Image (cartoon, rainbow, N blue to C red):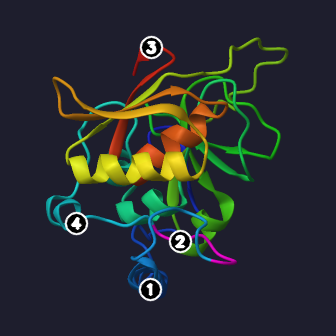
Amino acid sequence: MTNGFEEVNAGGGANERSVPDDGMAALRAETESEEHHTARGDASGTPSWPMVSSTAVAEGAPPPVGLNWAQVADRIGVDVRILDHDGSIVLAGEYVPAPGFVVDPSTFLARSARIGDRVLYHSYFIGELTANEFGLKLSVDPDSGSVPNAVVRTACAPVIGLFKYGADAERARRQVMEGSIGYGVSVQQGPLGTELRVARTQNAGRVATVMASHHGAVISVGGESL
């Protein structure tokens, strides 16, 4: 117990805080073999890595605002590339895509979730398989987060992502377009940097996930700033 919260190390020892070497070796090998692809799921039979720009690799993090994987990686002590590749953004009213952990974007505490569980607020999601494979250590929220008969409006478009580099925004735009998951898609220069705007979508969480996977920060959903 730490600060009143239980710490769970999925697939690792009690004192592990980093990704196992064998997992990172496989991660790097997959990155190198798939770097010519530009979207998840475009390699037959297995998810592929989003193409990462040389500037993003050199400079690192997305803008430190909204929902982005860099701040999660920093808090739980894991390589951000794992979250870029395997993590998901699940927005209010949406259902978790697999068994795993819903991570609160304010406290970074996690709670376990099953397929069919609905989230009540915008959250990060890390699948159980990923947590086990890389031995991720998560602090668990003692509050289950369950609210019987809760009424929550499902998040909707527009979705806006902020990017440090225009090349990353362009890659995310192409993935949204090629996957037909969003419409009215445009890249614009905003007051804080390069913005990717998706005006219409049936799956706002998936659009947000694509933005985050390309080093973006999701800064607005359904007209609400995050």
Disc 4 is placed on an element classified as helix
The residue under the point 54% across, 61% down is 86
- The residue indicated by pointer 4 is 57
Main SS class of the magenta portion in the image: loop
Residue at numbered disc 2: 48
At x 39% / y 70%, what residue is drawn? 18
**Earlier-in-chain disc, 1 versus 2:** 1
Q: Which residue is mark 1?
A: 33
Placement of 168 over or under 202, stated as above or below: below
- Amino acid identity at mark 1: Ser
Q: Nearer the viewer, residue 92 or 110?
A: 92
Element type at mark 2: loop
Q: Amino acid at mark 3?
A: Glu
Q: Nearer the viewer, mark 1 or mark 3?
A: 1
Which residue range is magenta in the image? 44-49
Classify residue 4 as left or right of residue 97. left
Separation of marks 3 and 4 at Cα, in angstroms = 30 Å
Q: Secondary structure at mark 1?
A: helix
Residue 7 position within the rendered picture, expressed as x and y whole percent measured from the top left? 53, 52
- Mark 3 to mark 2 CA distance (whole Å): 31 Å
Measure the C-alpha gap from mark 4 to mark 1. Answer: 16 Å
Residue 110 visible in the snapshot: no
Instruction: Answer whether residue 40 is visible to the viewer in this image.
Output: yes
Do the residues under discs 4 and 1 have CB atoms within 8 angstroms?
no
According to the image, label 3 marks what residue? 224
Report if the CB atoms under discs 1 and 3 are less than 8 Å apart: no
